[in-house]
Each structure stands twice: as structure tokens, then as C-alpha cells.
Image (cartoon, grey):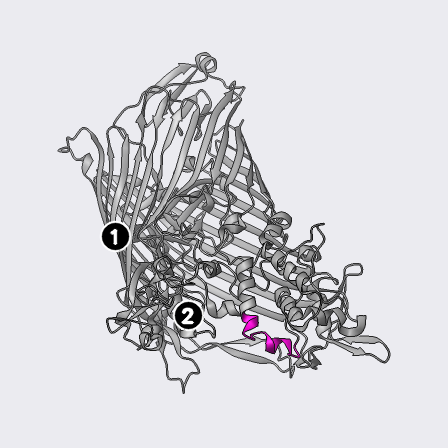
Amino acid sequence: MNSSNPISDVNVSGGNFSNKTDVEGFIVLPENIQTDSLTFSHLNFAKRTLSLNQVLKTSVVVLTNLGNVLETVVINTGYQKIDQRISTGAVDKIALDRTQDIFGSSIFQKLEGNSPILFDKGSNKRSMTIRGLSSINNSNLPLIILDNFPYEGDPNWINPEDIADITILKDAAASAIWGARAGNGVVVITTKKGNFNMANKINLTSAVQIQEKPDLYYLNQISSSGVIELEHFLFDKGYYKNNENSNSRPFLSPIVEHLIAIRDGLGNVADHEREIERLRTLDVRDDYSRYMYRSSVNQNHNLSFEGGARNLRYQLSARLDDNTGTLNESSKRGLLRSFVEIELHPRIKISSDVQYVNDRSIGGRTAYSAIGTRPYMMLADVNGHAIRHADYRIGYLDTVGNGLMKDWFKYPLDEYKKRRATVLSNMVMINMSADVKITEGLNLQGSYRYQYAASENKTTYESDSYMVRDLINRYTNIDYKNLSTTSGIPNGGIIDQSIGTKKTDDVRIGLSFRKDWQGFLLTALLGAEWRDTQNENMTNKFYGFDPNTYSLAKVDYLNPYRHFINKSNIYVPYADGKTLRTDRFQSQYANASVAYRSRYILTGSVRRDASNLFGVKTNERWQPLWSAGYKWNLSEESFFLVEWINKLSIRGSYGVSGNVDQSRSAITTIRYMTPDQYTNLPRAVIAQFSNPDLRWERNSTWNTGLDFSFLSNRLNGSVDYYIKWGDDLFGTAPVDYTAIPSKGVMRNIAAMKSKGIDVNLNATIPLGSLIRFNPQLMINFNSSKVTDYHFDGTYAYQFLSNGTSVNGQIGFPVYSILAYRSLGLDNLGNPVGELEGEPSIDYQKIRLQDKSVLEYKGSVVPRYSGYFNPGVTVGSFDFTVGLLYKFGYVFKANSVRYGELIGMGALGDGSGDFDKRWKVAGDERYTTIPSFLYPNDSQRNSFYENSSALVESASHIRLQNITAAYRFSVKTKFSGRLFFNATNLGTIWVKNKKGIDPDYIGQLKPERLLSLGVRLTY
């Protein structure tokens, strides 16, 4: 619609036809259109009328920019739609046109790097936050609103192609309307619903994505040669002597078995030594990469129909996601949706929105893990045949039971073929709403949502799987006289199954009022809502499964059996339980705004929430919440004569919202368990102790902001400064142990404070008639600290914090690192600490010092984060680069843990430092990794593992994605978009000296994703 950039939402009308252009600036005209001319109008552009023949001939219409006229932006809060000019809150409206070319089954995959949401892959505790943390021992995830109701389902069940609008509510003025669940911010998602008087439209989107298999050598792991060196050393020290003679027959590695044979003169010494040297050259990661991992292929296809008539609008859509992962795991998801709104009367509208999801996942091959094996223990021989592994002494298993027992070896190469893990989920969601116009400006609205989700998680182990064979053998009793066996575990497969259902009913009824008179605009909202959620879960374990007859076998859970190897008493594993949880919420709310000539705006909201989870007193069940805000549109004043400033607004707000933990209650609760397996008697446990003073968490936010637009809207954005106070936060309070058998209970005794700055800049810079530069920049700064928290502790070691759990120290961030001060290594390779201001290796005395000797290394949550997305449009081509950055935070790198390494239990990430350790005098100049000592010194190890030597800067810049798209049309019938996207392109700069990607510490890093797709409109 413009020579250098498409324009969406252009009104196109003529005769009996009226519609708007889509996000690509395209519109499809009906074949039977009855008009001689078409008029094109838009708030930002001069109106233009052209003959129908001229439009059909050129297929491109150019509109003239009016310069200083700004487009009206509508903010959706989930309760009402508000013109951004009279909104006092801190709100971000996501530019969906910048996300449409990013491949993703979930909308949140598209929002990373295109929204103020901070995605932290390091911990589920803080995996997705808005404006930092708002709680200490509670969830910090934002509230998700889908079509005006809270959504707690799987985000993958929201069809990205159905989304029409995403609005992020950040401050109290914007989010307080959602009350006790809005303390972490609110993500409001609105789906497409068609339009009245809209021509029928068909949309088809299809895309495919390929991902390379992961690089298993990304992790810093000990080499096979290093493991063999260590095992040889331990063998010479007699470390394995007890295991050699143990009646439990514990596993001894191939290296140890070779060393035993050499010591005892079994076989040819040269052959054993050659085999040991051969094993040094092997790495099982080669086999995993060859046999287990592959490139993944993901597909999604979406078809939708939308349109409307004078009294009807509709949206129908169907989506299929067909994904095959890097371990050959598969996932197929189908989504269906039907929305219809009918105007029964000029005063009455009713609508229905029905969604159905079917999601099926099947597990794949075995993922690589360094636990329970050695890096030289391969999966396959040179001919590709499975190599056997063992959990007990290999020589013992070769002869155990005189051939009467099942094969007691495992074959990791093939084990996944004998295990089938499936997850089947279904969800139905029905929204019904009615809008009745009582009088001019006064409407009555009623809404109801019903959501039902069911999932079945089932893993079936075939009768010849190692899990079944091992279990049967352990419970076996052999009658050598009659050459027969019996077992407490029947022959056949084993099924582990869990079934869960979740049913939610939401009801809302409210009145909305709008009155415009003599320059004043009054809007108000009053209503109440009720929410009831029931979660039911059941777990079972079945034995003796026969897939041919679908039959099961009975087992004896009550009587003990004797373990075949160690002769201890054991019982048949039992899993048969059922749980039911009911959550009820009730809310009452009201908000209002007054605007005078769109220049001076005042807003306010009040709300109170109640829940069956809180309070033994009425005033503790209900939580009152409120907010107030103001806005001054300075640029609309008559005295404001700065021509290059198109918009300048000042706003401010203060309000109180909340945070709720649905797992806590104020009264003593017990949970009934499955019957005791030894007595078969019923049993129950105390789930929570009496806590009558328990209250909702409170979050208060003060925000002041500036909205602006300069140079004919070529540069626009906002700047916000905010302070947040978290009061009545959950913290562990001590209790009388003689009265309650617990060290503490969660009470509202903690507090925190945070402050920050948000900067959002968008520019549109024409570079000629065909080229336009469209950069986006977002800067988020957030700093927080704990202001009140109970913590019992006296000595330094009690205050150590590695960033993965709550620090709880007043004056420090919730998640931060406090570490022993490291002074490097001495000339014997010992880590050196500080004792009373002097270098020391007296680790016992170092750990018993006052906490003031600990070194604060920083927050593990970024203080600065954001993105820079330069975009360029060249004619019909669009190009965008997505750059993410996170600064001002730290992480603790994994390193060798000698205590666990001796037992071969720490061969994963960080164990590679064993090969880089101090070995000879002078190495202390080049490494901070201590020497290996035997016997193990646990205090020495603990000092090093909690020292500042392992703390690194996590600051980095990431190339998140690159997109390219081509817009095209075929006559007047079709318009389309061909797009390419590359994601997970890695870091382009990291500050830490080890080159570790801070988003993937101790885990495999996903490889780049390449996708290609097409979007067609008819």
C-alpha cells in the first residue's frame, strides 16, 4: 500500500464492500464487487479514491503520509480495550509482524527477543520474568490471560497463527485489575475473531524446520585417558579391594577388571595392557552421536477461514504440528478452533469460542548421560552390534544361576527399542459470552469459560527389557534340585502409568460504562467473577503385561522376598495412588478513568480476591488491592509548539497487586496415602501445619513514564522508571520443634525491593523510495535486594550461595553468589583461602569464620537485558536480525568434584578439569584447579567448590535469529509471503574467560534451527 512499506488496517470501501488490509498491506476483493470506485483511508495517511479499473490494473495503491498524525493504538487488558492515549499504565504491545516469520510451536518461542519478557534458561524458578523478581519463595512467572480469562494450560496449545494481539501489562496501573495473581506482570493474549462486514478470507501457512543434532563435546568432561589414569591410581591404593570381596557383587569397570587380572596373573599381561591402551582412545559420545542422535525435522501447517456479514463474524482454524526430535522422539499435535459472534439485536451480541487440542508424544532413543558408565564403554562394536554393560561384576553375571535366570546384562544400544513412552493429552475449552447494551454507553457483559484437560503418561517396558529382566532376577528364588525358578515379579511387561484431569469453570459478570460530554470522557467497569478448578491425578504400576491378550498378573505386595544377590528383604515396588485438589477463587473489581480533552487523564482501580486456600479469618481470606494513575498528554496542549515532537506524554502510577501460591493453606492439612506396604493399613501424613496468620503476598509498584514520538513518527518509544516493594512475602519462620516436628513453616515474614528502568525505541527511517530501515531497541535495567528475611546461621559456610537457590541475605539479590575468597593455589596445588586477613589452607577454620569474610560475586539474574533488532525493507523483501543481550550477572562454572569423582559419580560437565589440574610445582601460575589428593579431603574440596575461583561473568550478546521474507501477489486473488528463519545462532560475544554459553551451563547446547515457510491469503 506504500511504495516502500506495506500498511495494515487501511479501510477500503466502495458500494456494498468494506474491509481492511492485513498486516502485509494486502486485501482481496470479491469477484462480485458492485462499485465503480474504492476509497482508501487511514489515520496516518491522506484519503484517496480510485476507480475500480485503476485498482485492478495497478494492484498497488500508494498513500501519502500525513506526517504528524499518529496511529491509534488499542490496549487490551483482558477486561476492556483502552485507547493508549488515555492509558496511564506501563504497557508493551507486541509487534506481531516482527514475530510472524519465526518458526515456533509456542508463541513464547517467538516472544524471546521481541518482548520485555526475560527468558532465563538456567532455572525453572525464574524461567520467564517481567521486570525481575517479585517474590522470594513463590513463583515469579507472569499471569497469562487468553481471551479475557486466566490460562494455566500448556502454552503449546495456543495456536500462534490464531493470535491477533499480545499486550504486556507491567506496572500496577495496568495489571492491578487482575489482583492477587498479577504481581509478576500479565501477558494478555487475544485471538483472531474475524470482522463484521468482512469479505471471506482463507489463510494457509505451512513451514518446515530442521535442526542439527547436538554437539556432545560441548560439555567439559573428563577424557577416557583421565578416567583410566584415575582408576589405575585408585587400584594401586587398594580403593576397590572391598568391592572385589563384597557379597553384593558391585560393578567394577573393565579397566579395574583388567588390572585385577594382571595382578592375579590371569591371561596374558600384554593383551590386557593393549586393551587398556585401546580403551584410552575411545569416547562413547562418538557412539551416541552416531547411533542415537539425528537431525530433527519439525513441521506445522495451519488453515483458517475468517469473515463476516452485517450481523455475524467468524474465525475457523485448524493446525497440525508434526515434530521429530534429535532422539527420534515424535510429537503430533492437532488444534481446532471455531469462533462465532452473532448480533441478535442491535443491543445484543452473543459469541461462542470452542477449542480442541489433541497432543500425542512418543519417546525416542536414549539420551547421552555420563552417569553410571565410563567414557570408554562404547555402545557398539566395530560391526555395529550392541555391547553388553552390567550393574554387577561381569564375571559373576556370566555364571549366575547356572543358566536358569534371565540375561542380567543390559544393552544400551537397543534398550530404547524395548521401552515405549507415550504422553496423550486432550483439551476442550469453551468460551461463551454475551454483551447487552442497556442504554447508550452502559453495557452488561457476561462470560463463561469451561476448560477440561486430560493427560495419560504411560511407559511400557517389554518383557525382555533390562528393567524387567533385572527386576525379575532380583526377586528370583532358584530350586537347583529341580532346576526351576520362581520370582516375586511375574513374567511379562511392566507398565508405569499416570492419568491426570483438570477441570476449570470461570464465570464473570460485569457492567461497563462510557460517557463523553463537553470534552470529558468517563469510562468505568464493575464486576465479579468466580473460578473453580479441580485437579485429579492417579498413578499405577502394572506387572505381567501381555500385549497379545492385554492381560495383567497379580503380585504380592505384603510379604517380603529375598534379594537374590545380597539376601536382604525386599518388597515388590508399589505405585497405586490418587489425589484430588480443589481451588476456588472469588473476585470483585471496579475501575474507572476520567479524561479531559484527551490531555489530562486520571485512572483508578480497586479489587478484592478471596480463595479457599487462605485464612481462617474472613479478613485474611479477602485481599484488597488497588491502583491509581495519571497521564498528561503534553503535546496536545495549545502552547506546545515543538514541530518535530509529534507526541509527548507524562504518566505515573502507584498500586498494589498480589502473588498467590496455590500449594499453601492456613490450616493443618493431611494427605491420605496409599496403604502401608508392610501392614496394608491406611496411612496419612501431615502435608502442612497450622498457619493461621498466612496471608496473600503483596506487591506495590510506583511507576513514572514518558511516551514520545519524534520526526513525523520516525522515532517513537517510551521510558519508564519504577520501584517495586514486595511485602508479606513467604519466608521460613522458626517454630517450636516440641510442638511441631518441623524446623520451620512458611509465613509472611519476608520482603524485598527492586527498581529499574525500561527503554523502548522504534524507528522508521526511509532510505529512498524502496528502502526503509526499521530498528527496534529495548533496554531493561533491574536491581533487587532482600530487605527482610529470617535466616539462622553463625558461620561462613552456612551463608554460602551458589545462585541456584534463594540467598536470603538482607541487602543481596534473591538469587546471588556468596563465595569463599580465593587466593589461587600454593606451590603444592592446594587452594588458598583467607583466614583473619591472611592466606591460609586451614579449611576448617576458614569455614567457621564470620559470614563477613565471604565475597559477594553478583546476581545470577541479569541486571541489564534487552534486544536490538535491525530490520530492513527493500521493495517486497524484508530482512530482520535479532540480537539479544544480558549484562551484569554471574554464574558458577562446574568443575571437578574430587569427592564424587573418586566414586565415578561426577563424570559430567566440569569433570574435564581433572585433566587440567595442578600436577607439578609451577602449575599454580597457569591454573586454579587444585591438585588431586588421596585420601580425599572433603573440607578442601568444599572450599574449592564454593570459592570465587569458579565464578565467571555471564554477560553476553547472542545472535538469536535472522529472518528474510518476500511478499508477493497473484493478480487480485492471492497474496502471500515466503519466509526463511535461522534461530539458535549462538553467542557472538561472551565476557567469561572460559567461553561458556551462560544460557547453557552444564547442559547440551541446542544447535541452530533453519526453517522455511509460506503464508498464503485468498
Residue bearing the label numbered 2? 941
Magenta stretch encompasses residue 43? no
- Residue 193 seen by the camera: no
- Residue at the spot 42% in from the left edge and 60% down from the top edge: 125
| 998 on left or right of 479 | left
In the image, which residues are magenta? Answer: 234-248
Task: Give the amino acid type for the residue marked by disc 1 in the picture.
Answer: Tyr
Q: Is residue 522 above or below residue 52?
A: below
Q: Choose the circle earlier in sequence order: 2 or 1.
A: 1
Q: Is residue 20 above or below residue 455?
A: above
Q: Amino acid at mark 2?
A: Asn
The residue carrying pointer 2 sits among few (fewer than 14), some (14 to 19) or many (20 or more) residues within 10 Å by Cα, namely many
Mark 2 vs mark 1, foreground winner is: 2
Secondary element at tag 2: helix
Left-right relation of 377 to 695: right
Image location of residue 379, percent across then percent down: 65, 55
Q: Which residue is mark 1?
A: 722
At which x and y percent is residue 718? 27, 41
Q: Nearer the viewer, residue 359 or 536?
A: 359
The secondary element bearing badge 1 is classed as: strand
Is residue 660 shown above or below 173? Answer: below
